[in-house]
Image (spheres, rainbow, N blue to C red):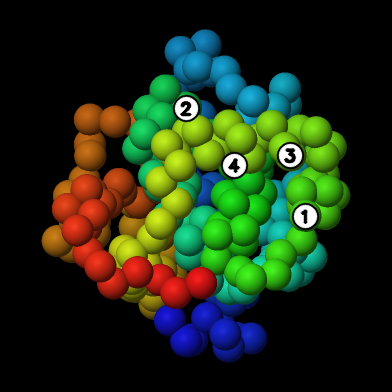
Amino acid sequence: MAELESPEVMPKVIAFLASLLQRVAESNDLNHPLETQKISVFDGLTRPTISIQSYLERIFKYANCSPSCFVVAYVYLDRFALRQPLLPINSFNVHRLLITSVLVSAKFMDDMYYNNARYAKVGGISTREMNLLEVDFLFGLGFQLNVTSTTFHTYCSYLQRGMLLGSPDLHLVPSLPLDTGRPLKLHCCFHEEDESTHQNQLTV
């Protein structure tokens, strides 16, 4: 998605992702009370005062990772939500999940990236906590970090479609199965198992 390199496009991607995550977090806050959820290292004691969009903009400004990392972070968040149904994305964990997903995607995608201490500073947490979040996130993903070109372009297409519509559609993604029996995650959970045989992978 060469358009990601355009300075006019990334602010729109950030705004769309923030809007999507905001709606998901608010929905899970209402439908899945904290007392019914498994508490994890990603959960804060209180809701952060910084908005999701401002937090994403801060990460984009100071993490200095490639624009593709935000698409891959989006893939990772969807995978994490699918693999960890007892840890739905909500207002108490979305910020830590965001900074961790971008950190992991930058390490996987970029030849040069900032260390955990830098990401901790950007995210407003300690380096020790950043280290713990990274390890927990990797185990939560089952260390499934590879993203095929097919998956990457599928998520890019959804982002483009969402930006054209002006708001995230959490329930209607043509030709992609919805997992309606699980807590609301992102727009849906793309079933990537069938793509494991694809040989065409992202170059890093």
Of 69 and 177, the residue lying toward us? 69
Of mark 3 and mark 1, the one earlier in the sequence is 1
Quadrant into which the N terminus falls: bottom left
Of mark 4 and mark 2, the one earlier in the sequence is 2
**Mark 2, other Cα within 10 Å: few <14 / some 14–19 / many ≥20:** many
Q: Position of residue 142 (x, y in %)?
A: 42, 37
Residue type beneath disc 2: Leu
Q: Position of residue 153 (x, y in %)?
A: 34, 72
Residue type beneath disc 1: Asn
Of mark 2 and mark 1, the one earlier in the sequence is 2
Nearer the camera: disc 3 or disc 2: 3
Side (left or right) of 22 relative to 182: right
Q: Which mark is residue 87?
A: 2
Q: Secondary structure at mark 2?
A: loop
Residue 175 occupies which quadrant of the picture? bottom left
Q: Is residue 30 above or below residue 169?
A: above
Residue type beneath disc 3: Met
Residue sitting farthest toward the top: 35
Q: Position of residue 152 (x, y in %)?
A: 37, 67
Nearer the camera: disc 2 or disc 1: 1
Q: Which residue is mark 3?
A: 130
Q: Residue at x 41, y 57 (%)?
A: 146
Q: Residue at x 76, y 33 (%)?
A: 129
Of mark 4 and mark 1, the one earlier in the sequence is 4
Label 4, label 3: how far apart the Cα atoms are: 10 Å
Check if mark 2's residue and mark 1's residue have beta carbons within 8 Å.
Answer: no
Q: Which mark is residue 115?
A: 1
**Mark 1, other Cα within 10 Å: few <14 / some 14–19 / many ≥20:** few
Q: Which mark is residue 97?
A: 4
Residue type beneath disc 4: Leu
Q: Position of residue 17 (x, y in %)?
A: 52, 60
